[in-house]
């Protein structure tokens, strides 16, 4: 059984208890020299504190970095890759007559393609806009757009 003794008058100036002082304290309280003396905090002097080696610290740091990469991959990188893949597939599947919306919010019908990068979009009867193919953000259905105000 360990007992904690705190005797301010028996400690040295440095605040630690010397071996002679331990023996004196044990003799005063009827203990034997075999009894472990503990400090006021309750930690045994024979116990060694947790040893943190360089290898242990490196492994902990690598584990934390691995977990951060894992979190970033599944929260940020993977969804962004899915969106880019869907955008590329949509760009490849564009055809004449599709109703599209541009990144600026203009809705029209693809009239023709001029090469690989240019699309002519008809936004109203007789009104055609030339724009970059990459400026098309999505293909919209007729149900979403409805009738325009000019279609009487």
Image: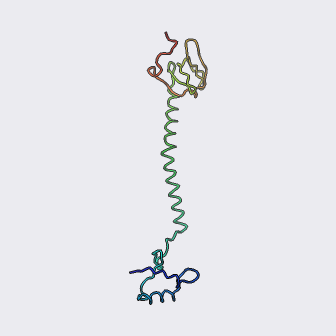
Q: How many numbered marks, from 0 up?
A: 0
Query: Is 70 located above or below residue 137 in the figure?
Result: below
Query: Is 102 located above or below residue 147 in the figure?
Result: below
Left or right: 122 as drawn, with respect to 4 = right
Residue 27 percent coordinates (x, y): 44, 90
Left or right: 125 as drawn, with respect to 146 = right
Residue 103 percent coordinates (x, y): 56, 27
Residue in the picture at 56% in, 22% down = 106
Can you say which quadrant of the picture contains the N terminus? bottom left
Query: Is 112 located above or below residue 32 in the figure?
Result: above
Of residues 83 and 51, which is closer to you in this image?
Answer: 51
Residue 139 percent coordinates (x, y): 49, 25
Left or right: 4 as drawn, with respect to 18 = left
Residue 145 percent coordinates (x, y): 48, 20
Query: Is 141 located above or below residue 7 in the figure?
Result: above
Of residues 29 and 132, which is closer to you in this image?
Answer: 29
Q: Which colour scheme is used?
A: rainbow
Residue in the picture at 57% in, 21% down = 113
């Amino acid at each position: 059984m360990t007992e904690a003794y705190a005797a301010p008058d028996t400690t040295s100036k440095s605040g630690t208890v010397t071996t002679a002082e331990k023996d004196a304290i044990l003799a005063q309280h009827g203990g034997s020299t075999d009894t472990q003396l503990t400090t006021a905090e309750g930690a045994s002097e024979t116990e060694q504190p947790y040893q943190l080696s360089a290898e242990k610290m490196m492994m902990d740091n690598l584990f934390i970095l691995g977990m951060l990469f894992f979190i970033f991959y599944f929260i940020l990188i993977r969804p962004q890759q899915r969106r880019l893949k869907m955008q590329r597939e949509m760009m490849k599947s564009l055809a004449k007559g599709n109703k599209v919306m541009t990144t600026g919010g203009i809705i029209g019908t693809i009239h023709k393609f001029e090469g690989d990068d240019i699309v002519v979009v008809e936004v109203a009867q007789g009104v055609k806009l030339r724009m970059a193919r990459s400026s098309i953000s999505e293909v919209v259905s007729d149900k979403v757009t409805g009738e325009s105000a000019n279609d009487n």
